Image (cartoon, grey):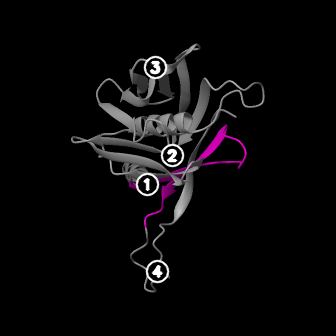
Amino acid sequence: MRLILLLVFIWQTAALQAQVLSGISTRWSDSFVEWEIYAAIPRDTTRAEPEEDSEEPDESLYGELKLRWLNVREDFSEWDYEIGEERGTIRQKWKDDPSQWELRSYNGPVVSMRTAWPNDFNEWRVTDNSISLNLKSRWTNQFDEWLVDDSAHGKFYMYTLIKNDPRDWAVEDSMDDSISQSMKMALIFLTVFNGSPKQ
């Protein structure tokens, strides 16, 4: 019985790791307080009949990000998230300082996020106390392209699907397996938070 449970756990873990993040979109077209996270679905290569040729991969809903106090007040300093099987919170470390954030997973590491330079929201340092990544905006006056380019861990690139429209973002995730879902969630959060209006 233990062997069966172990095999089921390994299969589920492999299925979760096979998910590649592909995008995030607002749940509603006129609000930036609720987001849906998508992952690419691996194609079934064992099918006998090929499907129509399509450049776009299939996607499935993989998680969400939303304000914690959604119906009570518009407080953009506290968020809840779910990505895959992981849940947690993202909060400003200090209520009056939007340059420092903490992501706390209910079953994973604490991820700290802070601006690389005082009063400059174009570059962020993201760390789980074992790995540190730098997230940078491509432009200083327009926040619709963000990139992590780390020689040891790979690339993480986010950009708006339509220029100057922060409702829909594409994610190109080629980070290695040492980067946790929590770290990726922190990168997604910083991108959409800094790239979207607060409404």
The type of residue carrying mark 1 is Gln
In the rendering, at what x and y percent does residue 8 appear?
42, 53
Please say if the residues under marks 1 and 2 sit with CB atoms less than 8 Å apart. yes
For the residue carrying disc 4, how many other residues have a C-alpha within 10 Å: few (<14), some (14-19), or many (20+)?
A: few
In the displayed structure, 60 sits above or below 98; it is below
Q: CA distance from mark 4 to mark 2?
A: 28 Å
User: Which of the two marks, 4 or 3, is nearer to us in this view?
Assistant: 3
Based on the displayed image, in which of its 4 quarters is residue 78 positioned? top right
User: 43 and 91: which one is in front?
Assistant: 91
Say which residue appears at 41% left-offset and 23% top-offset.
115
Q: Which mark is residue 53?
A: 4
For the point 29% across and 42% down, the residue is 149
Q: Amino acid at mark 2?
A: Gly
Camera-nearest residue between 74 and 145:
145
Q: Which residues are magenta?
A: 18-42
Q: Residues within 10 Å of mark 2 (few under 14, many from 20)?
A: some
Which is closer to the viewer, label 1 or label 3?
A: 3
**Residue marked by disc 2:** 84
50 versus 19 height, above or below: below
Which residue was labeled with disc 1?
19
Q: Earlier in the sequence, mark 4 or mark 1?
A: 1
Could you say whether the residue bearing mark 4 is in a helix, strand or loop?
Answer: loop
